[in-house]
Image (cartoon, coloured by chain):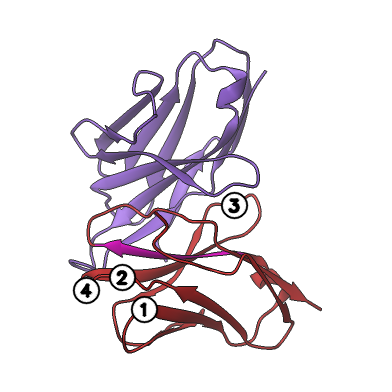
Chain colours: A red, B purple
Amino acid sequence: DAKTTQPPSMDCAEGRAANLPCNHSTISGNEYVYWYRQIHSQGPQYIIHGLKNNETNEMASLIITEDRKSSTLILPHATLRDTAVYYCIVRVWSTPLVFGKGTRLSVIA
Amino acid sequence: GAVVSQHPSRVICKSGTSVKIECRSLDFQATTMFWYRQFPKQSLMLMATSNEGSKATYEQGVEKDKFLINHASLTLSTLTVTSAHPEDSSFYICSARDSSGGRGEETQYFGPGTRLLVL
């Protein structure tokens, strides 16, 4: 069973913020939310992760709802190079990442 | 982020031959590494988990005698596809876990992938 639900595709105008939603309504208390992306024909790239607090790094911000049942990855100023498949993954410490289908983000000039 | 390398990036081989793919963590030690496979237009599928110095754990449906995994050091894991056949053609991606951040803060970093084509 999929632990996360993401829209299959999204478009975003270059320079605008890209907001990628993820539903993880069955998340348990010891599961972290991880975001990765995969640019065509490359290995996945780590973006950010969090447990319950919002997180920000040089790449993106992660907003997790108070009940932890959903989250949003925010790319503040999307560029063409951000076009990729974005994966939201929940996992317990020490378990491997299991990938779903992700969201295909297309950044449009 | 941490860097994981893979070699070769692309390999073409004849049916029945064996192919070895190397995965290295360049700036951190990885007690645990993972191997994934990705077919065109599909997501990554976990094949196996390897821990340094012990036998790999394979996911259901993955033949351990066909996909030999060795994790002999904290920075190197190898995947050998034995007696490769055209249906083994795929994109193979390794991943290494960086545990330096402590419990719960482990992050998996991925290599660039190896594209295998078996003729």
Q: CA distance from mark 1 to mark 4?
A: 11 Å
From the image, tell me which residue sits under label 4.
A29
Magenta range is A85-92
- In this rendering, is residue A14 above or below A37? below
| Mark drawn on residue A109 | none
Please give the chain letter of the residue carrying mark 4: A
From the image, tell me which residue sits under label 3.
A42
Asked which secondary structure carries label 1, the reply is loop
Asked which secondary structure carries label 2, the reply is loop
Q: CA distance from mark 2 to mark 3?
A: 29 Å
Please give the chain letter of the residue carrying mark 1: A
Question: Which label lies toward us, 3 or 1?
Answer: 1
| Mark drawn on residue A69 | 1
Residue A63 horizontal side relative to residue B101, left or right: right
- In this rendering, is residue A51 above or below B115? below
Q: Nearer the viewer, residue A36 or B25?
A: A36
- The residue lying at 69 percent from left, 78 percent from top is A79
Q: Identify residue type, mark 2.
A: Ile
* Residue A15 occupies quadrant: bottom right
